[in-house]
Amino acid sequence: MKKTLFTLFCAACALPGAAAQVTPPAGPVAGIDTAGIEVARYYGGCRAAVTYTFDDGLLEHYTLVFPELRRRGLKATFGIIGSKVGRDMKGTPCLTWAMLREMSADGQEIASHGWEHRNVTTLGPEALRHEIERNDSVIGDSVGLRPMTYFYPGNRKSEAAVARCESGRVGSRLFQASMGSKRDSAWMRGWVDGLLRDGAWGIAMTHGITVGYDALGDPRRFWSHLDYVSSLRDSLWVGTLADVTAYLRERGAVRLDITAGDGVVSVVPRMALDTAVYRHPLTLIVPSERPVSATQNGRRLTSRRLGGACAVDFSPAGGAVLLRAEE
């Protein structure tokens, strides 16, 4: 089942290999190679992506992990069990709603891990609705944002449960690599190096830090790992579960209609996804030996050099992206 779900996710997201559909005009236009315009594999034109997820809403996620993420400018995803907030998870203290509000305000993602951490594959329709919707409601009311991704308790899932848990969200955690007590520094570095080598997306799953289930023990090796990851940010996208999932699914669903004339290239994105849910910007790769200026809906877009091309972040739900090669 795990392999089947991951295969479905890859198909839905058009994971690396299948690019967005492009209809280009023939030949270069005013310094821009229109035939080479495409949506980048990952945001910012990165070669790979990594997401750090923390299960159960443990107190140390706030007291230890959050300060280290903030110090490095990194964002992660925290799966919250609503009924455990301010209490404990099997004897391990949990954080509070005030702590979660502070983390969310910093840009950390607050995800749902179920109201009572129940196995979603064993629940009837009403019990599943309660497990999902009560947690969504409490997190939304207490933090201010409805959770846009879901962690499956015990990583137990079925295609029917995934369809229900992902309803109205960008997605859920369908695969992961455990990063707990059995992982040393060499393994952590090798895992990230493998992502870069393969152009892949990896999701790390962690529970306890110094105490609790599968605790890391000495957290300093994890902080050193975050230092290493931070040094790779030109090529490795460190994104939340919601952001990377949304980007990949948008990339797989968008079509680019490209026209050119009078020194201007027009790229019109057409995306058949719910834009109230899928709102992450995509990155356009524009082959050009000269700097490229870009606008969308009259607003200037950020354009930066990336080898022999420019990378332009744009809204897949917006209007035409107008490109001009600068003199």
Image (cartoon, helix red, strand yellow):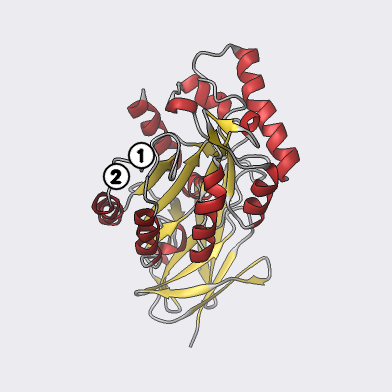
Identify which residue is drawn at 63% across, 41% down.
Answer: 274
Horizontally, residue 127 falls left or right of residue 36, namely right
**At which x and y percent is residue 206?**
42, 41
Horizontally, residue 17 falls left or right of residue 91, namely left
Task: Please state which of residues 287 and 78 is positioned toward the viewer in this rendering.
Answer: 78
Q: Amino acid at mark 2?
A: Arg
Q: Which residue is mark 1?
A: 178
- The residue most toward the bottom is 327
Q: Amino acid at mark 1?
A: Ser
- Report crowding for label 2: few under 14, some 14 to 19, many 20 or more residues within 10 A (C-alpha): few
Q: Which residue is mark 2?
A: 183
Identify which residue is drawn at 35% across, 74% down.
Answer: 307
Q: Tell me whether circle 1 and circle 2 mark residues in contact (CB < 8 Å).
A: yes
**At which x and y percent is residue 27?**
38, 69
- The residue most toward the top is 124
Q: Is residue 166 visible?
A: no
* Quarter of the picture holding the N terminus: top left
**At which x and y percent is residue 230?**
40, 64
**At which x and y percent is residue 15?**
38, 45
